[in-house]
Amino acid sequence: MKKPLAIAFALATFAFNANAGIFDGKSVEVTYFFPNLSTVYGGPNTYAVGPGVEVSDLVDGVANLDIQSDGFTANFFMNGGFSAGAFNGFRITDVNGTIDAFTSFSLAGNTAFNFGAPVLSFDANNLYVNWSDLSFQAGDVQFAVNNLAPVPEPETYAMLLAGLGLLGVVARRRKHKEASA
């Protein structure tokens, strides 16, 4: 009796957690700009997001960029600083329009910047990181990205219905057993 109930609960729970991360399996374009957003300094280059580091040389050999499911990490190899300008940083763009609109973008961790933090901005399809005039040391800067919840796939609804159906069967059996006792 307890086994079907546990299976039903697991199916219903899995149905609500079946969505993949924002960037998993998607293609993004990374472009570096300096001294403003009208002047391309590096790129644009397109990357398929998967395991491992996507961008091995984000800018001038000082950092790489690893894009994960729901964010990304810039890893700095050495100490240094960024020149001042209206914009000295990079943009990540949804290349194929397959990522739901970005709704928030924040700094999640920082061991590279002691004084100040990069300026973050975004629109529906772009994430901007501007670290103009900041000094850095060897370490990581982690960013968290959110977007609207995707519309559930039909399989998600099927799993939810199967789980609820199983719960109904268990409840009916329990009620029938109690009535006959």
Image (cartoon, grey):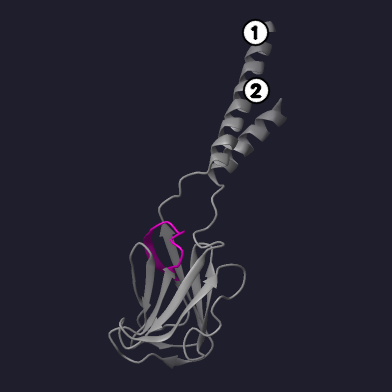
Q: Position of residue 175 (x, y in %)?
A: 62, 14
| Residue hosting label 1 | 179
Q: How many marks?
A: 2
* Residue toward you, 109 or 96: 96
Residue 110: which quarter of the image?
bottom left
Q: Nearer the viewer, residue 36 or 73?
A: 36
Q: Look at the image and say whether residue 166 sits in the magenta stretch.
A: no
Q: Secondary structure at mark 2?
A: helix
Q: Residue at x 52, y 58 (%)?
A: 21
Determine whether, in the image, residue 25 is placed left or right of residue 29. Answer: right
For marks 2 and 1, give the CA distance: 14 Å
Q: Which residues are magenta?
A: 94-108
Give the residue type at disc 2: Val
Is residue 104 within the magenta segment? yes
Residue at numbered disc 2: 170
Sequence order check, earlier mark of 2 and 1: 2
Q: Residues within 10 Å of mark 1 (few under 14, many from 20)?
A: few
Q: Quadrant of the N terminus?
A: top right
* Foreground of the two, 88 or 41: 41
Which x, y percent locates residue 17?
A: 55, 47
